[in-house]
Amino acid sequence: MRARLEQIGKLDSENIENERRDIAGLRIIFYTNTDVERFLNSRLIFENFEIDRDATRIHHPTAENEERRYRAIHYTVRLKEDRANLPEYAKFKGLRCEIQIHTILNHAWSETSHDIAYKNKPREGFGNKAMEEITKRLNRIMDKYLLPAGYEFQKVQHDYERLQQGKDLFDRNLFDTLDNAADNNERFELITSLKEHVIPNYDDVPAIFGDLVEPLLSAVKKAKDSPAKPIVTPFGELEGKTAGDVARLVVEIFDMLRYVDIERTFGVLCQIFLEQEEEQTRSRIQNAVENLAKYDLGVWEKVGPGVQSVLADAVERMTPTNQEAVRPLVVKVWDSALNSEITGTTWRANSVTLSSGSVPVSPEIIKVREKAIAGLFGLFKSATSDAQRRETLLRCARRRGRRHVRPTQTTCSSLPLLTGFASPNFSRRRRTLCPTSCGSRWNSTICSTITAHAN
């Protein structure tokens, strides 16, 4: 304190409480950044004290403070008038106190650096270079270890809380709660929690897939009978969720789980399509069917054209009337089956690998495509408008006009030959993103080539 008063020329002051705001103080230490945010959002300090805003500081490295790594929030406070008037607090009236907000990692760094660097006075001719190195090491500890560690603690806490939210929903029977939802706002919120907090944490999703279908379909039906209600907030009303919002969210879930039960997923999407008239929702369902029916490299490596075979059989078993009712979805299935390209995407921390190539010819593929061509001609015969006939012919012509490519040799060690299925002829391009994620630097290289000849 003496040194600080000397520094500002107030050593002889008789009112040092007015000269220094931190004569009295306390430090509140939290485990994580999230805990700090919650405390600040609680408004406890603002509700219980009068804040001296001119003296309040948020400490972080800036050019003005020579990039000091000290990080904290300092509030200078006084007792509020109503409390200062109480007899037991009267003697503290007008006095200031500093409240410091820290995480435990920042507290450890602050105390260590304070004792080593802050209290140490430079001595002429001795140890100054060594102290500079020690200060640099302290700064490096903060930048390289403590800041990332604080962020990782925060992420772990968020993930754990999401897990707990999912567990709470699981424990109180989410489906019963969803069935009794008061309106589409509550319905949408519950389905969002199911999608984000419950399903990702199930250890065996296929085992519960069947239990998801009926409650979600029921939610879509009930949403149609529920008018949109505004969402009330302290700052005004927001536009409420509609039946279309609920339906699209349910479609997203089945799109996410599309390979768990291929035929049932297709059936569910067809059912929702029949019940929805909104073009935006129907378009989202068509996208989901396209995602299900397309040739995906990752799926192909496991089951070959198994997905397309299941869908082709499912569509064939539909009556002509039912096919006509969901014509856009049937067209998507047949169009994807005739596609000659197979694609795949692999994401890593700093890169994305895009793979594409020709679908290998096999007896299974020939069978699927024969069904697709026959199915499209069937749709042509049952078309009720020239637009439908034109679309069907265009798809047949576009797909049949492509030449199949049969691979005869592969040099890519990352894609072994599949048991029972030929490996597709593909080229893989890796795009490496700039570390800042700005996307400004891309390195494209071909990592595989396959000698092929036209079929």
Image: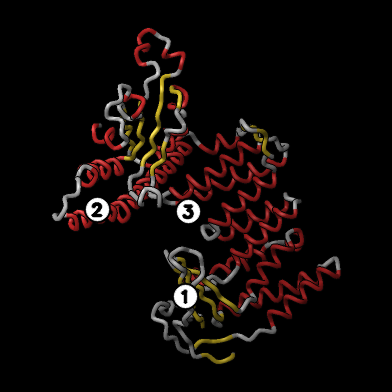
**Residue at x 74%, y 63% (from the top left corner):** 327
Q: What whole-number distance in Å separates the C-alpha atoms at marks 2 and 1? A: 42 Å
Q: Which residue position is annotated with label 3?
A: 206
Q: Nearer the viewer, mark 2 or mark 3?
A: 2
Q: Give the answer, above or below, for where 94 lies relative to 53.
A: above
Name the quarter where the N terminus is drawn: top left
Residue type beneath disc 2: Thr
Crowd band around label 3 with a 10 angstrom C-alpha radius: few (<14), some (14–19), many (20+): few
Mark positioned earlier in the residue sequence (2 or 1): 2
Q: Residue furthest top?
A: 87
Residue type beneath disc 1: Arg
Q: Give the answer, above or below, for where 88 lies relative to 383.
A: above
* Residue 345 seen in render: yes
Q: Nearer the viewer, mark 3 or mark 1?
A: 1
Q: Which residue position is annotated with label 1?
A: 430
Task: Say whether residue 313 is left or right of residue 430.
Answer: right
Crowd band around label 1 with a 10 angstrom C-alpha radius: few (<14), some (14–19), many (20+): some
Return the residue nearer the eye: 84 or 367: 84
Task: Say whether residue 93 is left or right of residue 359.
Answer: left
Residue type beneath disc 3: Pro
Q: Which residue position is annotated with label 2?
A: 135
Q: Position of residue 252 (x, y in %)?
A: 59, 53
Q: Position of residue 187 (x, y in %)?
A: 61, 39
Say whether marks 3 and 1 touch (CB < 8 Å): no
Q: Position of residue 60 (x, y in %)?
A: 39, 46
Q: Give the answer, above or below, for where 426 lies relative to 148.
A: below
